[in-house]
Image (cartoon, coloured by chain):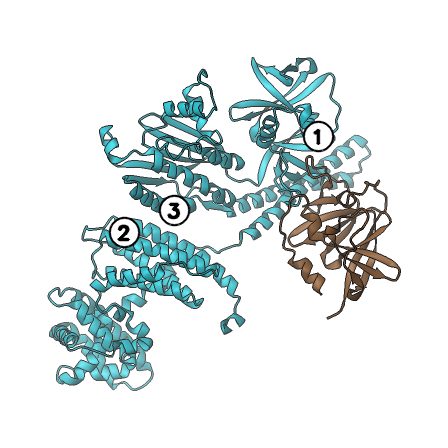
Chain colours: A cyan, B brown
Amino acid sequence: MPADEFFDRSEFVQYFRDETDELLNSIDADLLRLEQFVDTGTIDAEIVNSLFRALHTIKGSAGMLEFAAVQQVAHKLENVYDLLRKDRMPLTESGVNLLFEGRDVLTALIRAAVSEAEAPGGVDEYVERLDAFAGVYDSTAQAIEGPRGADDQEEDLTPVDEEQLSAFEAEVARLLAQAEARREFAAATQDVHSAEDAQSARDVQSAREAPAAQEAPAAQEAPAVDVSSAQAAVDALFAERPAAGQPAPFAAAFAPAPAQPEPQRAAAPAALAPAANGSASSSAPAPDAKRVVAAKNQTIRVDIERLDMLLNLVGELVINRTRISDIASTLGRELGTNGRANDALSTLAKDLSESSALLARTTNEIQESIMKVRMVPIGQVFDRFPRMVRDLAKARGKDIHLEIAGAETDLDKTIVDEVGEPLMHLVRNCVDHGIEPPDVRESRGKPRHGTIKLNAYHEGNQVIIEIADDGGGIDLQRVREKAIRIGVISESDRLSDREIVELIFTPGFSTADQVTDVSGRGVGMDVVKKNILRLKGVFDVDSVPGEGTKFTMKLPLTLAIIQALLVNVAQELYSIPLDSVIESQRIDASEVRTVHGSEVITLRGQVVPLIRVAEFFRLDTPRDPDKVMIVIVGLQGRQVGLVVDSFQGEQEIVIKPLSDVIGRIDGISGATILGNGSISLIIDVHSLVATAYGSGRVTRAEFSGV
Amino acid sequence: MSDTIQVVSFKLGSEEYGVDIAQVQEINRMVAVTHVPRAPQFMEGVINLRGQLIPIIDLRARFGMPRAEHTKNTRIVVTEIGTKRVGMVVDSVSEVLRLDVAQIEPAPEMITGVDTEYIRGVGKIEDRLIILLDLAKIITGSEKRELDSADVEAVAAA
């Protein structure tokens, strides 16, 4: 392709992908809104216009990149929306379904085009169905192309049939009858006629626009006449006449129209075209729409990697800021204690400490700003659910309303990306297992339609996302039976309701017989929970039998910077994220007891198992015979004590991933660089505890097993 | 196109090794390495290189040779393979050599101490033998990951 020499195609393809992603989402949302107008006889023109514009943009971009199939389907769909927009087609359920399908076909085509994969099957078949569907309402579908496609449409349009012409003549006659509306226009054309210089061309233009605006409503007000066929004829004739758009012949031909029928037939269409058909409106909305978008959406696209890089650099800045503050305070102290400080030095030290405080403030602000830049609204994820719920509910024969609130709540891009999957799982679960079928609901005295509420909001430094349904709630009895069946608990275990609910998070719990167990919740709930924990989030479930279930996730606003407790283990500094730390304790070595060979302490009457971090990490460090330093961490309601060598205080740290060359290390989630340039590894409390317990606590066997 | 390649040569014990200069980012003196527990045994740890965390491989350990005390000659050769940066601890760095491609032979089947998998070939320069390393194979470590070895091959083909 010669075009490739002039622009970086891949960049455009990438842009195309991003842009169409957004447009396809908006199409989905619009279609869902449009669906509410089915069979009502009315329609919200703005929705249809928005759909039309989205497809128009996709078509244009696809055309530029020579994605012919995408262009074609977008074009066909555009035609259908055009029919809707012009009220030439009623909105039916089958029509909407076809449009939904079109959106999916388009999505698949775009994916294939972007990834240079083979086009998905079934496209031709879909296009045929669409054509057949649209054809019913639009016998001259091609004509819609109007002036824009004039050049390449010519051969399609040559046969102008007599019927169209006579209908058109009738329309012309009717319009001509409205002589009143014309008078000004006639005057304008006269002026044009006499003017000969270039300047007059502009006047012509405005003269031409004026009657167009006047006549458009007139044409619509005439239900008796078949506007569409007249219009099609107008279009057809107009298309045949490339010169028609030029002012001179237009004006010349129009002036004598009433007197001479013959030239009128040929020329009048040119004058009427902008008035009667949508040519003015079909080309105008596109630039308009762009302007509107540009005005309300002052954004640019930035590669997330660049932001990561920026964040990384800011992380460095934060580290150096800490370092400079340290130096400033050390210097001040030294000068003070030595007592031999001369004035100049003292002043310098003071200046340094002041400017380092200033630096600290600015750095904090930069850091916050960058964090904000990385924030995106959770709506990006929510957007896909209305369609999903609609389709799923239909497939399951349920009637479900999805209510979304707080879509504008923003959080870190990485979290938004990661949270999509678990959320989808939960929403799916609500549809599948939460909401009962309409008849069941009715018999339980509930409205036939179920409701799923998706809500997001900020709370302090966290974002709360709730997914609630008003379905049957978790069937505790069944969960319990199943847990017994698969051996998670035994018949004799006494569990509280809460503990039973928690069972759905047991790995493998749901997969055991999910095919037969329809009412039981928890398809892959353990995975959902694990993913949320990985995001340093908290996941909770509330269920009231008969009333519904509510899942709540609490997520940090960002993952990059956290508060941590620094501890010494075997001469190295480790960081423990503060959000999992409950307290730190220094206790007497004699208070450590053993249960089945595992060390525990008793803390306020509770038995807390211990994990010696050094031994878990296979580090060589002598045990202190007198005292034990313990960091109590909370983990899914349990407490575990991590034994360390000493505490080093709290600090804000910037999380950096360990190189993937090293691979995943159990018990380590990353590393951070401290103020003095040294590295501290960050302890992954969840995986540390899970690994230690998974291998039957930290026993000798664990160490020698390597 | 030149039919020579430039390599950075370094020593492990009495043997001399070489890596393509295009893959060497810098050479540093030994610094404090933060130990990473539970990492593969040849993984010395991580260092802070101007704010970047760089994993450090003890090349002796990687090749199954006995570890050596660090001396004033010990160096960290920071390499860049694809998007991955890795530092390698070596006994000493000798020089930058220009090797005639015609003088590079495939790895002999038996080379003491080194698994031939990591060897791209053996270059001869006068009476010295330079063992050319395939860095991508070295850093993939215990996990077998298909790395973008295209770079390495491109250089090899140069």
- Residue A230 location, x and y as percent? 17, 71
Q: Which amino acid does label 1 sit on?
A: Arg
Q: Which chain carries label 2?
A: A
Front in this rendered view, residue B63 or A338: B63
Which of the two marks, 2 or 1, is nearer to us in this view?
A: 1
Residue that badge 2 annotates: A34
Q: Residue furthest front?
A: B109
Indicate the secondary structure of the residue bearing disc 1.
loop
Establish whether labels 2 and 3 are both on one chain: yes
Which residue is located at x 52 percent, y 70 percent?
A4
Q: In this view, does A465 lie to the left or right of A41?
A: right
Q: Which chain carries label 3?
A: A
Q: Is residue A54 left or right of residue A421?
A: left
The mark that comes first in sequence, 2 or 1, is 2
Q: In which quarter of the image is residue A245?
A: bottom left
Q: Which amino acid does label 3 sit on?
A: Asp
Residue that badge 3 annotates: A383
Which residue is located at x 39 percent, y 64 percent?
A69
* In the image, residue A11 above or below residue B57: below
* In the image, residue B152 above or below residue A192: above
Whole-angstrom CA distance, mark 2 to mark 1, is 63 Å
- Residue A11 location, x and y as percent? 51, 62
Front in this rendered view, residue B157 or A451: B157
Q: Which amino acid does label 2 sit on?
A: Leu
Report if residue A354 is visible in the image: yes
The mark that comes first in sequence, 2 or 3, is 2
Report if residue A353 is visible in the image: no
Front in this rendered view, residue A200 or A72: A72
Indicate the secondary structure of the residue bearing disc 3.
loop
Residue that badge 1 annotates: A618
